[in-house]
Image: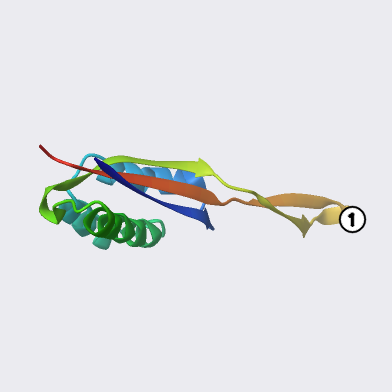
Amino acid sequence: MEAKASAKYIRIAPRKVQIVCDLIRGKSVAQASAILLNTPKAASEPLLKLLRSCAANAENNFEMNPEKLYVAKVFVGPGPILKRIMPRARGSAARINKRTSHITMVLAEKE
């Protein structure tokens, strides 16, 4: 049995979120929570919120044991890009891409 949760339109670039996702993949929920609380990255805050949401889904919707849960899958995909411009020299403009992320987390129970 697996419990799933996703966070969409997070205003952090996917490549920055991927670094933190790699830290918690395969860890128990308690261990992953401790890692996220002590990681000084901007992506750790939305990932911690998502982890807690996914753990609550597992406990309340699927009656899973919260002590046996571990992060089975966590992956991030690109969301829509907010396109902005920055004025440059001689009347030209440079494009700024403000990237967003869709994060999906799946928790499973250890046998």
Q: Residue 49 sits in which quadrant?
A: bottom left
Q: Is residue 19 left or right of residue 92?
A: left
Figure colour scheme:
rainbow
Q: Is residue 89 left or right of residue 67?
A: right
Circle 1: element type: helix
Q: Residue 110 sits in which quadrant?
A: top left
Q: Position of residue 9 (x, y in %)?
A: 55, 55
Q: Is residue 51 left or right of residue 109?
A: right
Residue 97 versus residue 25 in the image, above or below: below
Which of 77 and 94 lies nearest the eye of the viewer? Answer: 77
According to the picture, the residue beneath numbered tag 1 turns out to be 91
Which of 39 and 47 lies nearest the eye of the viewer? Answer: 47
Image quarter of the N terminus:
top left
Give the residue drawn at x 25%, y 62%.
37
Residue 59 versus residue 24 in the image, above or below: below
Q: Position of residue 75 (x, y in %)?
A: 40, 40
Give the residue drawn at x 19%, y 54%.
63
Instruction: Kindly identify the amino acid type of the residue bearing the numbered disc 1.
Output: Gly
Q: Is residue 68 left or right of residue 48?
A: left
